[in-house]
Amino acid sequence: MFWSVNERLVFGRLRGIRVGRFQAGVNSAAVVFRLGSTLIEAGPPNRWRQVREFVLEHPVDTVLITHHHEDHSGNAAHLQQEFRARVLAPSLALARLSHGFPMEFYRRVIWGVPPRVQAEALEDFARFEDSSGNCWQVIPCPGHSPDMRCFLESREGWLFSADLYVASRVRYAPRGHRLDLEVESLDRVLALPFTELFCAHRGHVTGGREALRAKRDYLGELLERARDLRGRGYSLGEISRRLLGGEDYVSVLTGFHFCKANLLRACLDQ
């Protein structure tokens, strides 16, 4: 259950590596994709050796970061320093990337602490072409994190969805998660003309549009039921237990930073 993850992914001209210190569920490993000379995500800092070996196989000059979380941005500084790669990230992520950000103990154990990095800003809905001829569009997708953005490669119709998908039915979320904004982000992405979905934890998702739609329907119903119960006077804890079941070892081990109630908290506390 707890051995490390080091898997290679291939889809057409796309290459990827899925790495993690532990193999303890889909969230405990992360994927770094390479399309031409561009990386999408930088991977967790405690997996730098595996990511570096992957990068050495093909020249890389650009790194696209979807949001500041350490499993996505963790090796950006190494890539910038050793490979002279440009690091591009959402404008809302720049301060956290350059100054650091608080991390709970469990995150330090699972992913490691990322070195600070000075990244270049990507503005919402920006379109640009990289050195390999890939055409990118930046799609704002807050909910999981305010600074999270997805990347659409428009020539292939490939959507790199950061943490927007992960699973069609989720039961846990980190503190600060906004379920209502996540539903809006799913609606925004489902309106895009993408043909393939690439998740930063699962890799290529077969039937990606249907998978995203299933998650949107599930979360939309969850949001509606939670707000109905709140209107009837139920507390957050009661609503969470009714809709998601009681908290368990995942919540306890993360100090309740990653728990079931957090999936509902923000949309009910407004």
Image: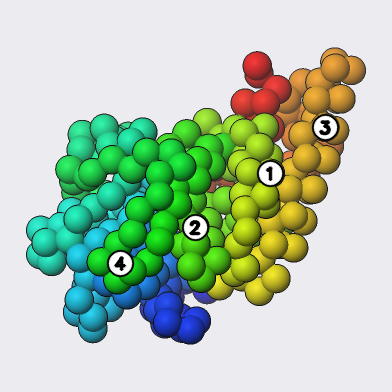
Amino acid under disc 4: Thr
Q: CA–CA distance between discs 3 and 4?
A: 40 Å
Q: Residue at x 73, y 28 (%)?
A: 237
Q: Nearer the viewer, residue 69 or 35?
A: 35
> Residue 34: horizontal and vertical position, in percent?
35, 72
Q: Which element is circle 3 on? A: helix
Q: Nearer the viewer, residue 119 or 101?
A: 119
Of the two numbered discs 2 and 3 on the same chain, state the one appearing first in sequence: 2
Q: CA–CA distance between discs 1 and 2?
A: 15 Å
Q: Which element is circle 1 on? A: helix
Of the two numbered discs 1 and 2 on the same chain, state the one appearing first in sequence: 2
Can residue 183 be seen?
A: yes
Q: Nearer the viewer, mark 3 or mark 4?
A: 4
> What residue is disc 2 on?
152
| Label annotation for residue 38 | 4
Of the two numbered discs 4 and 1 on the same chain, state the one appearing first in sequence: 4
